[in-house]
Image (cartoon, rainbow, N blue to C red):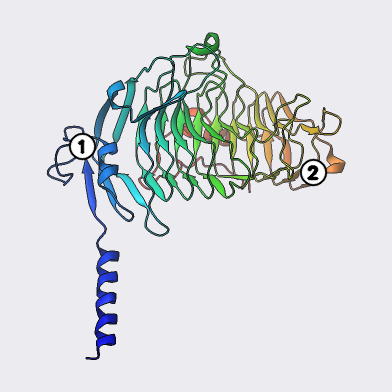
Amino acid sequence: MPFLAKLLKHCVILLSAGAAGAAEWHVAPDGDDAAGGSRIRPFATIQRAQRAASAGDTVFIRGGTYHMTDGMIAERRRIWAHVIHLDKSGAAGRPIRYQAVEGERPVFDFSAVKPKGLRVHAFQVSGSHIELVGIAVTGVQVTLTGHTQSICFSNTGSHNHYERLSMHDGMGIGFYLSRGSDNLVLNCDAWNNYDPVSEGGKGGNVDGFGCHPGRGDTGNVFRGCRAWWNSDDGFDCISASEAIRFEDCRAFQNGRLEDGRRLGDGNGFKIGGFGIGPRYNAPPVIPRHVVTGCLGVENKASGFYANHHPGGIDWIGNLAFGNSTNFNFLCRDLSAHRDLPGFGHVIRNNTSAGGRAEVRNLDEARCELSGNRFGETLSTRERRSLEPQRLAAARGIDGALPDIAFGRKHR
């Protein structure tokens, strides 16, 4: 065989071996970081597994409770304590995947992590091309008494995938994106999160999901996610410089807790806006967010709220029921620094029922409306399908939302 042909064949073999050579690593509550990370001799921590993993590898996480401590904080930087810090990136088509073992539920309990004077980020994901699947976070703490926030999953990387995560019964925001492009948050749940420590226990800074990307951080999507019993809002994207897409998400009974206490703002979907002061700090191009196929049910304030946005938003096929205001389309005039009835919105095939107010702050002449049913009367069966216990029912094995059996198409 000619030399060139032999060399080419050898390169093909090496490339094939590299593509097929993705490794598997294992983590378990009874593991040991001095072990080899195999299924039989697993690591004890995800932080140790990250050191071993490379692009294309999978880290399998066994079920059980992982009791996190201050001694496990990976990084203390300025005002933050990053407990688990995923800063090693995968590659396009070869992510590093951190995945619960099929049929098992790993729960990371941060109740004992209380670093003095620092904000807690339970999982800080600054790397890119990373996947996190099937992990639960609970008990995230706040120790500061002023204006602050802790976070269960904080994203600053790009091309990351978050799926079937549970964030509950803590003091931190469930999921929070402050930087990064093309991230997908899929079939994740955030519930019963409330901060009783900072700002007199008002609970006004604990959302289920927050997305606040900077300029250039495009392509972020939330799909099939649920937020309920969070002390502030279900979904919040105030001060986002780029458009965000919310698909088939559900927000119910936010702004109150399971015990009935009423706390923070309590909007289901707080979409857009940049504050209301004269220094508005809006980007040069106002982002046009999309909210489609979503449910806002029995939230303390609005089911869907445009939040002083200085431009239009696409509201397509959403259902609001039993909120103080079902749809609040309030916009803002940047030049005059004053609020105006909603303008520039595309409002199509939405349904509202049972609110104290069905629609507020809408300038119909300056919006595109079609196929909406505001002020509907729902059947007994439809109302029952929207009861909180049904909306909070267990997901399917594949992460699918529970069927609400709503009698009418709301797309």
Identify residue for label 2. 344
Quadrant of res 33: top left
Is 80 positioned to the left or the right of 349 in the image? left
What is the number of callouts on the image? Answer: 2
The answer to whether mark 2 and mark 1 are in CB contact below 8 A is no
Q: Name the foreground residue: 312 vs 353.
A: 312
Residue, disc 1: 28
Instruction: Kindly identify the amino acid type of the residue bearing the numbered disc 2.
Output: Gly
Q: Is residue 285 left or right of residue 36?
A: right
Please provide percent x and percent y for residue 346. 75, 46
Q: Secondary structure at mark 1?
A: loop
Structural crowding at the residue carrying mark 2, measured as other residues with C-alpha within 10 Å and reported as few (<14), some (14–19) or many (≥20): many
Can residue 180 be seen in this snapshot? yes
Going by the numbered disc 1, the residue's amino acid type is Ala
Residue toward you, 318 or 247: 247
- List the single residue furthest toward the front: 3
SS category of the residue bearing label 2: loop
Horizontal relation, residue 137 to residue 345: left or right? left
Tell which circle, 2 or 1, labels the residue nearer the N-terminal end.
1
Q: Residue at x 75, y 27 (%)?
A: 279
For residue 43, above or below residue 174: below
- Front label number (2 vs 1): 1
Q: Looking at the picture, how far across and down is residue 297, in whole percent?
A: 59, 30
- Where, by quadrant of the figure, is residue 26 drawn? top left
Residue at (17%, 41%) from the top-left corner? Answer: 42
Residue 150 bears which disc, if any?
none
Q: Position of residue 88 (x, y in %)?
A: 36, 45
- Which of the image's four quarters has the N terminus? bottom left
Determine if residue 292 is in view. no
Q: In whole angstroms, how far apart are the C-alphas of marks 2 and 1?
A: 52 Å
